Image (cartoon, rainbow, N blue to C red):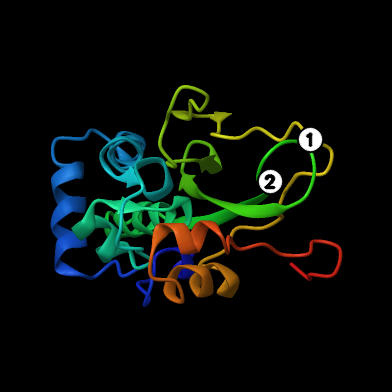
Amino acid sequence: MKLYLDSSPYIDTQHPNIVARAAELADGCADEEEIAKRCFEFVRDEIKHSWDYRLNPVTCKASEVLIHGTGYCYAKSHLLAALLRANGIPAGLCYQRLTIDGNEAPFCLHGLNAVYLQQYGWYRIDARGNKPDVNADFCPPLEKLAFPIVNPLEQDLPGIWSEPLPVVVKALTEHQTVEQVYNHLPDVDCQNHKF
């Protein structure tokens, strides 16, 4: 579990702003589940999804997402992991491979989280941000993700990562605007990729 509690360059749990916001979100909570729900709802509802709002700058580090109040799904998952870890709750990163528009290629990765709750074990949550056709929620043990897998070509990538996939970091650090990221969304070839 240590890997899922560690601070790192992109999940910078020990950044003063992360530490302060994590403590604020945990204040008055009765247990880890309530803390996790509060952290989830904060990232889902208060941090704007970069593409939905066409907001720059492009963020990647958890602290950048918090400071600028915006991030793509991947960056938002980095912030949620950092807030949970700062509260001593193990958290990791998960990915789905989804079609971008419709029922065929091209594909892209979608970033979300898994949190370890004593009562349930690993539980996936998706703080991407709700909108008319997206309604993710925190209701363990039931998963209510932003994008259920409905297309046979789409899939949940196996595993829970302690660190972001390199292809995700590359997309978020090598492009200067949300439009550039959108035109270069990260993807992996699941047939030839070892997870």
Task: Give the position of the C terminus as an image quadrant.
Answer: bottom right
Q: Is residue 52 left or right of residue 98?
A: left
**Residue 116 sits above or below residue 79 on the image:** above
Q: Residue at x 62, y 55 (%)?
A: 109
Q: Position of residue 69 (x, y in %)?
A: 24, 51
Q: What residue sits right under mark 2 in the picture?
A: 98
Q: Are marks 2 and 1 in contact (CB under 8 Å)?
A: yes
Which image quadrant for residue 187? bottom right
Q: Secondary structure at mark 2?
A: strand
Can residue 44 be seen in the rendering of this structure? Answer: yes
Q: What residue sits right under mark 1 in the picture?
A: 151
Q: Is residue 46 left or right of residue 96?
A: left
Can residue 163 be seen in the rendering of this structure? Answer: no
Count of marks overlaid on the render: 2
**Residue 19 sits above or below residue 107 on the image:** below
Identify the amino acid type marked 2.
Leu
Q: Position of residue 77 (x, y in %)?
A: 43, 53
Q: Position of residue 170 (x, y in %)?
A: 52, 75
Identify the amino acid type marked 1.
Asn
**Considering only order in the chain, which callout, 1 or 2, is on the residue closer to the N terminus?**
2
Q: Residue at x 36, y 36 (%)?
A: 33
